Amino acid sequence: MAHVVYVDGQDGTTGLQIREVLAGRTDIEVLTIAPERRKDASERRRLLNEAQVAFLCLPDDAAREAVAMVENPSTCIIDASTAHRTAPGWVFGLPELAPDQRARLRASTRIANPGCHATAFILLVRPLVSAGLVAPSMLLSATSLTGYSGGGRRRIEQYEAADRAPRLQAPRPYALGLAHKHLPEMVAHTGLVVPPVFMPVIGPYYKGLGVTIPLHLSQLPAGTTPAAVSEILRRYYADEHFVSVLPPGDAASLDDGHFDVTGANDTNRVDLCVFASDSQLLLAARLDNLGKGASGAAVQCMNIHLGLDERLGLVG
């Protein structure tokens, strides 16, 4: 029998992507809500409690309200909002985070989908903190360049308008109050105790995300080499289908000397790279902000929770 799924917020960017990923699956039945009943609380409650897995593709407050509607103890909620990523009782939906993470995802009915920027940052930093190479108190900085689709429907309409403002043709740093909503999960799930100085930048292209973290080799234990850093990442993710660690300085990871932040688009893959000079390192990660950064990650968690092959419906 098919597994029953409901997407609350089915018309938003992430909701539409989840529905597209699931559209070809014969093992999944997707419940839908009639457009005229989209804000009908009783109908939403019925569908949420009828589903084995309910995806919440909603603003934070609406996601909290939806959680309160769920009375069926068997309904697994996968929340794509920021509301529960560091909340007690919720499992962080990043299967590659730790050896026991998949077991936790299978057992839990409360899963918080990671943010796109946070996914890239955490996958780079967590192994280095775990190995003792990066101290939890180290003062890090990170820059993330992302396509405009990460801003949702309103941002997409803004960028794709026929009369698009000239200022939107250039990259635009944002969250300049240094309190981006992904920072709490970036700290909580890496082992850091100090938030990084984080600057996200929106680019004039649809999707694709690249996070870079600069380091001086002098910040790391004596004798640390770029190859050693890359090897730590490689070993940590050696058995991971959706995480690829490219060799240090590998020309194949570059496009005529440039790091292509769209290089993992249309996949659920994350590429990790280490670039270096004699005295400095640049850790880099790229992913599809609508794939592994949103809908792909949610479907991967659904597959794991239901005891299915986590690669089902996803491109590696």
Image (cartoon, rainbow, N blue to C red):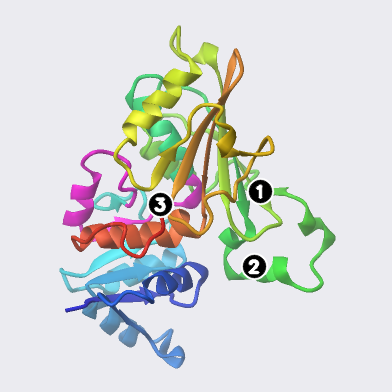
Question: Please, which residue is most extreme toward the top here?
Answer: 222
The answer to whether the residue labelled 2 contacts the one labelled 3, judged by CB atoms less than 8 Å apart, is no
In the figure, is residue 154 to the left or right of 121? right
The residue that disc 2 covers is 156
Is any part of residue 83 visible from this angle? no
Q: What's drawn in magenta, residue-wise?
A: 93-118
Say the numbered circle drawn on residue 114.
3
The N terminus is located in which quarter? bottom left
How far apart are the alpha carbons under marks 2 and 3?
21 Å
Callout 3 environment at 10 Å: few (<14), some (14 to 19), or many (20+)? Answer: many
Write down the residue under mark 1: 174
Q: Are marks 3 and 1 in contact (CB under 8 Å)?
A: no
Label count reads: 3
Identity, as a three-letter code, of the amino acid under mark 2: Ile
- From what the image shows, is residue 190 above or below residue 73? above
Give left or right: position of 286 versus 199: left
Circle 1 SS class = loop
Q: Residues within 10 Å of mark 2 (few under 14, many from 20)?
A: some
Whether residue 232 is visible here, answered yes or no, is: yes
Residue type, label 1: Tyr
Q: Position of residue 182 (x, y in %)?
A: 48, 47
Q: Earlier in the sequence, mark 3 or mark 1?
A: 3
The amino acid pointed to by label 3 is Pro
Q: Position of residue 45 (x, y in %)?
A: 29, 81
Q: Nearer the viewer, residue 139 or 212?
A: 212
